[in-house]
Image (cartoon, helix red, strand yellow):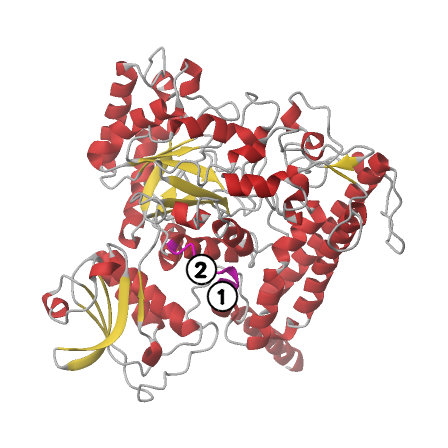
Amino acid sequence: MKAFSGLIGAVALLLAGTAHADDGYRLWLRHGGETARPAPVDAPAGAPMTVAVRGATPTLRLAADELARAMPAGTMPVTVATAGDAGIAALRLPFAALGDEGYLVRTVTLDGKRTLLIAGNSDRGTLYGAFALLRHLATGGTTSTAALTSAPKVKLRVLNHWDNLDGTVERGYAGQSLWDWWTLPDLKDPRYTDYARANASLGINGTVLNNVNAKADSLTPRYIAKAAALADVFRPWGIKVYLSARFSAPIELGGLKTADPRDPAVAAWWKAKADEIYRAIPDFGGFLVKANSEGQPGPRDYNASHADGANMLAAAVRPHGGIVMWRAFVYADTDPTDRAKQAYSEFKPLDGTFADNVLVQVKNGAIDFQPREPFHPLFGAMPKTPLMMEFQITKEYLGFATHLAYLGPLFEETLAAKTGRGRETVAGVVDGSSEGHRLTGMAGVANIGRDRDWSGSTFNQANWYAFGRMAWDPALPAEPLAREWAQQTFGGDARVVDTAVAMMMGSREAVVDYTGALGLAHLMATGHHYGPGPWVSDLKRPEWNPAYYHKADRDGIGFDRTKTGSNAVAQYAAPIARQLADPKTTPERDLLWFHHVRWDRPMRSGKTLWQDLVAHYDRGVGYVAGMRRQWDGVRALVDAERWQKTADDLAVQEREARWWRDASLSYWMSVNRLPLPAGVTPPEHDLAWYRAQHFDYVPGHY
């Protein structure tokens, strides 16, 4: 009997532990976490909470359900409605400035009773308002302080999924694709609804379902039906679906001999295909296109321009209100002197020639989502063309899923950058305010997969969160968003929140430090991009090689992009170009991006460039070690499952940060023949050991 009682006790403990386990599935939508939120001070304790719905749309019902599930007991009655409701219109509230998706939350008297009103000009605006109120409450607010109003500054707020039809995800580090193409359209996984809900909570209103390296099969009737099933799930949450279109589809699916955008038969094929898609998906958003980049087909195959290709597709979707997002990532061997110049060279001359339902989608930097890049020179250079920002949420170059790297500071750094055209910022270009564009957009390459925590780790969720919030308002700073996310993700304990925010805010800079500070970039190993490979110099095309980007030799290091080199600085507006042309006025964080300088160049720190570079590597590794100590300090305050997963990831990150540091220093010393500064720990192995490391089956490399 005693043994049996012991067994019962053990089972009870196990079940108790399970009850408190948390695998991260709920993201930031925890609605109070493990413990109920106390009743707000402006309502009598224990008073029933009611939600009235004025209207009958599925979206209003979703808003009401979110509030009914999450609002604490004792809250005053809540009303969800749209501005067009007669009773709401009679209140004469300031809806005019909210546009189609903005919201208003405030206490009003309606039908003689006090109620907390959540409303917008559309039911989507009301849904966003409901989530805004819940965010307000989860971050310390009360209904008495809930006087909220906001409208998105960017029209299209879109996730780009690089998901393949076979279930793999290019540059995906959170498991297989969320979309089970095999069982669609018959089986609709509940995760599709949970995905849509998470995006709606951030104001994300679009998703591109398939990889930009597209297969023509995505446009066949079979796959259109599958996309339509997803669109049906997403629609009540205010999310449109888009498809990446393969430019050569008229040949592969239509039997044409050409995909020349100027050929009437090609244009007719695309018009018929668009009509077919819209019959299945009436609110289909449009096409995303990667053309003439990394071997993808495009209009330049026929001596036509990017504008010719984009405008032909734009004409096909125009009758249905669709748009085309045409990527400016044109990575080919057409400009061997400097890969960074290619997009500007091809797109700048086309400014003003794109149709008015075309957005040119531009990466934040001119190379490829590096841990740090100067802002892309196209921002500010095409005032007659709407430019859509493309950020990468998945961390292809920032440690995949295991390295903690909060990207909010990267997004903020880019958006706040001055273009050199008066007081214009990149954010002003993206949101249309500086040039008066009404069609605007921001895209994020998603980090979402089938892992239970969606993103490969708890902290990776913060990058999805920060992207969505900044897409709504590009002026939002990174640090308050980190705090918002941490409060909603970990609960209200200030010790945990403060620790998480402190870790997050320096984490991206740490990755820059241990992978390539002072403007170094593209130093990763070939193909899979896992780990360091600054020594690679024997690949077929020059710009495939890391040595092409750092140009280190006995005397110095860095890529000369001034007039004595590639003259890429000339692609920026004159004030920026003048600043970057001189190493003395170039920000040191970008120094080696624009200049080849001597190893013994004096730096602001008082050290030589070599000494300063070594210090950056050590600082990056030290920051990761510091994050491990910080996280250890809150072990008793975080649920065991998420704490342990994060602790394990941080251990991997510290080991790999040291690998990056040691391998890089070994290589630089083989080139510059300089000793390490006094007191600096030497690399663990010699250069030959690091060069001999080889890895197969790296995640996300397909």
Q: Is residue 214 visible?
A: no
In the picture, measured across the screen, residue 191 lies left or right of residue 320, that is right
Tell me the quarter of the picture where residue 600 sits.
top right
Q: Determine which residue is flagged by label 2.
A: 476
Percent across and percent down for residue 220 are: 33, 27
Q: Residue at x 51, y 60 (%)?
A: 478
**What residue type is disc 2 on?**
Leu
Q: Quadrant of the C terminus?
A: top right
Helix, strand or loop under label 2: loop
Q: Is residue 58 magenta?
A: no
Percent across and percent down for residue 78 are: 25, 74
Q: Taking 61 as reference, is 287 above or below it? A: above
Q: Residue at x 54, y 42 (%)?
A: 576
- Other-residue count near label 1 (Cα within 10 Å), few / some / many at <14 / 14–19 / ≥20: few
- Other-residue count near label 2 (Cα within 10 Å), few / some / many at <14 / 14–19 / ≥20: some
Tell which of 489 and 232 is nearer to you: 489
Tell me the quarter of the picture where residue 361 sits.
top left
In the drawing, what numbered circle is on residue 559? none
Percent across and percent down for residue 582 are: 65, 41
Q: Is residue 504 visible?
A: yes
In the picture, measured across the screen, residue 693 lies left or right of residue 474, that is right
Proximity of marks 1 and 2: CB atoms separated by less than 8 Å = yes
**What residue type is disc 1 on?**
Pro
Q: Taking 55 as reference, is 560 above or below it? A: above
